[in-house]
Image (spheres, helix red, strand yellow):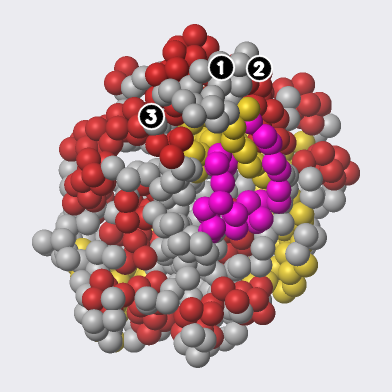
Amino acid sequence: MKKRKIVALVLAALIPATMLIGCGANNNAKDSEKTVTTESGKVKDKIVYALTSSPTGVFNPLLSDTSYDDSVIALTYSSLLEFDENLNPEPGLAESYEISKDNLSITFKLRDNLKWHDGEAITADDIIFTFTTIANKDYPGSRFGNVEKVVGAKDYHEGKADSIKGLEKIDDKTIKVTFEETYAPALSIIGGTGIVPKHIWEGVPVATWKEKKDLLSKPVGSGPYKVVTFNEGQDVQLEGFDEYYGGKPKTNKFIFKVTNEDTAQIELLNGTVDIVDVSNLKNQDLDEIKAKDKSIISYPNSMFQYMGFNLREEKFKDKNLRKAFMYAIDRKTMVDKLLEGRGTIVNTPMLTTSWAYPDEKTLNGYDYNVEEAKKLIKEAGYEDKNGNGIVEDKSGKELKATLYYPTGNKLREQTAPIIKESLKKIGVDIELESMEFQALMEKVVANHEFDLYLMANTPGSEPNPMAFWHSTSSSDEKGNSAWNISAFKNKEADKLIEDGLKTFDTEERKKIYGEFAKIMNDELPWVYLYDQDVTKATNSKLKNYKPIAHGDFIDVENWYIEE
């Protein structure tokens, strides 16, 4: 059975490196049967999916930087390959692929009769245009790492070439991608990047793409659904695409409805929404939902929560201070009380479910220890000399910081004051400032104007840390977004990241990432908090909804609700 792509937009490296070795490919997977048989013989004409924050309308897989926009993109765009629930690659736009014997190139063969939502044909030109755009020196997104290893991409990026040598059009249906060196995540990154239409975007200067709100909010994609209307703060309404290569979706309309957590729960019970994230509800509330004939499904998360330091600030450059913060925060109580046990403490910036996550015995667990935190604060040069409860440095400047956190996520809203009170116990004065998620992204990610911030990180099951932790992924330029948000720079970590990308053997890569994990566990550019299990409540008559950690929209074209 063919599966809808796992959202593969920013770092879509989802499969083990061992799957890249060899010449052949899984191809011509049988498309899902589109006939719907129900007891009543009737299928509801729409599915309503609740979002607790509004998409921003940046519905372009090369530019999106929020999970809310990504949700819409997952339904409206396609990639060369898709990934099933076991993270195995399957045909997407490409019906087959072949990896060269030296593992330096991949040749993709497109399906016949592929169409964009506006009826235009999809060809190899669209594929090459997509990856060339990512390498353009004026490209305003953060995906250059997706193509950086392609032969000639750096020269093109630096203006030394007019095209990318390693992107070769064999014919209208065949594309060959060649890499400078062995590159472990090549298949999943290239195969999993959303493809954009050349005929829509080629006349728009790349530097201005993010400004084209009309094009962004009314996307022309090739996925199972196409956007009909977008009302920011309210909803995104989509309808099935009859010419989708996987067949017309079983449900004609799909609506993303913006609502807060409390309202969404009520709407689920009233039947006005069909899928709601209830991860932040208490177990008692979940039991009540189940008692009212709704379904509950839980699965591992694809993200973990953290508090980031701005390492551009002098005070946070001291590792002892960062460690003091880590010891001062009782993360176990957060998991036990806030999550009611539905989560796991994280001690390095990797998913605990990842094949590369190291043995916890090799990491410092930073068990809650106020006395150790006070000791480290003192070693960092801070003491409360005037007895007012706030420590000062040698010049008498009090240790204060502002913690920014987004509204709309109840758990983070509860976490922020806990952190404030925890750090107060060791003499740190924390001011809390909440803001809408998009405003937080602008302030923190784009403009780097922060002391501390709360956010979630989605590293992907293929643990390529390049975009988040390599020195080159940092920016100090205002307005220049970069996913190494804290500006962490470490030569040893850089080398391990680079070595991990060059190594095909999974066990060897696991060792490399284990060493990387130890560095990050010791350096602490973030206070790693926890990963929380995802819990969804749904209409009990919803069929074929089988989400996993890295994909909430697997097989979405086959979802339906019995009337």
The spot of residue 65 in percent (x, y) is: 54, 58
The spot of residue 352 in percent (x, y) is: 42, 31
Name the foreground residue: 523 vs 358: 523
The spot of residue 73 in percent (x, y) is: 57, 64
Name the foreground residue: 506 vs 137: 137
Which numbered circle lies on residue 319?
3
Q: Which residue is mark 1?
A: 384
Q: Residues within 10 Å of mark 3 (few under 14, many from 20)?
A: some
Disc 1 or disc 3, which is closer to the eye? 1
Q: Which residue is mark 2?
A: 388
Assess whether mark 1 and mark 2 are in contact (beta carbons under 8 angstroms): yes
Give the quadrant of residue 292: top right
Residue at image coords 39%, 68%: 80
Which numbered circle lies on residue 103?
none
- Res. 465 in view: no
Instruction: Say whether disc 1 or disc 3 marks the residue closer to the N-terminus.
Output: 3
**Is 432 a magenta residue?**
yes
Mark 2–mark 3 distance (CA, rounded to whole Å): 25 Å
Q: Which residues are magenta?
A: 430-456
Mark 1–mark 3 distance (CA, rounded to whole Å): 20 Å
As helix, strand or loop, the secondary structure at mark 2 comes to: loop
The spot of residue 164 in percent (x, y) is: 26, 79
> For this view, does 114 lie left or right of residue 533?
left
**Identity of the residue furthest to the right in this view:** 270
Residue at image coords 75%, 64%: 232
Residue at image coords 52%, 86%: 204
Q: Amino acid at mark 1?
A: Asp
**Is 339 a magenta residue?**
no
Q: Amino acid at mark 3?
A: Lys
